[in-house]
Amino acid sequence: MAEAGVIFVGNKPVSSYVLAAVTQFSSGSKRVVLKARGRAISRAVDAAELVKRFLGGNVSYGNIKIGSEKVGEPGKERTVSTIEIEIVKTA
Amino acid sequence: MAEAGVIFVGNKPVSSYVLAAVTQFSSGSKRVVLKARGRAISRAVDAAELVKRFLGGNVSYGNIKIGSEKVGEPGKERTVSTIEIEIVKTA
C-alpha cells in the first residue's frame, strides 16, 4: 500500500474494500481514504456507505473530493474522473 | 424538473447532462446540483468534471454528499448509493 490509510477501490467485490477499511479502523486507524477512478467510483461510494452502516455512529465522512487524472501511455492518454472519500473515526 | 437547479443524471450520454448544466448557468443560475444513484454515480462525476473544464475558473465545487436510499416496491426494496455534487458559480 503506497500511503497509510489509503485503499484503492478497483474491480474486486465491494466486500473486499469494506473489510479492508473496517480492519484498518479495528487496528487503530483514525482515518481511511477510499480512492477510485472511472467506473469504480460507484463501487467506492457503495463501499463507503457499507463501512458507515457497519461501524454505525463511530465514523463519519470527512472530505469528499472529485477530480480527473490522465491515464494511458503517452500519445494515447485519456482523462478519467476520480473520487476520494475520507472516512474519519469519531468515537 | 422537481427542484430548481437540480439535474438527475441517469443513462443518457454524459454530454446531455453537461449541456443541461451549462445551459442553466448561462441562463443565470448561481448553483446547479447533479444527483445520481447506483451506477450512474460515475457518470455524474464525469459530467461535473466536464462542466468544470468547460466553464473554467467560473465555477467550483460546493458540497459533495454521498448517501443511500431505498428503491423498489415494498417487500422487494434494495439500497442504492447516491451522490449529490453541487457546482457553484464563482465569477
Image (spheres, coloured by chain):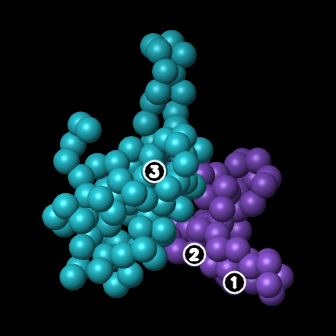
Chain colours: A cyan, B purple
| Disc 3, SS | helix
Q: What chain does mark 1 sit on?
A: B
Query: Is A14 on the left-hand or right-hand side of A87?
Result: right
> Measured from the top left, where is residue A65 in percent x and y?
38, 58
Gap between marks 1 and 2 measured at Cα: 19 Å
Q: Is residue A2 visible?
A: yes
Eye-nearest disc, 1 or 2: 2
What amino acid type is highlighted by mark number 1?
Glu
Residue on which disc 3 sits: A16
| Disc 2, SS | strand
Residue A8 figure quarter: top left
> Measured from the top left, where is residue B80 in percent x and y?
64, 69
What amino acid type is highlighted by mark number 2?
Ser
Residue on which disc 2 sits: B68
| Disc 1, SS | loop
Give B18 or A51, whichever is nearer the viewer: A51
Give A40 or A74, whichever is nearer the viewer: A40
Gap between marks 3 and 1 measured at Cα: 37 Å
Q: Which of pointers 1 and 2 lies earlier in the amino acid sequence? A: 1
Q: Residue at x 72, y 47 (%)?
A: B15
Please tell me whether residue A69 is drawn above or below residue B21 in the rendered image: above
Q: What chain does mark 2 sit on?
A: B
Give a yes or no on whether discs 3 and 1 share a subunit: no
Give a yes or no on whether discs 2 and 3 share a subunit: no
> Measured from the top left, where is residue A28 in percent x and y?
16, 64
Please tell me whether residue A79 is drawn above or below residue B89 in the rendered image: above
Q: Point out the image quarter for the N terminus of chain A.
A: top left
Eye-nearest disc, 3 or 1: 3
Q: What chain does mark 3 sit on?
A: A
Q: Which mark is residue B3?
A: 1
> Measured from the top left, where is residue B20 in percent x and y?
71, 61
What amino acid type is highlighted by mark number 3?
Ser
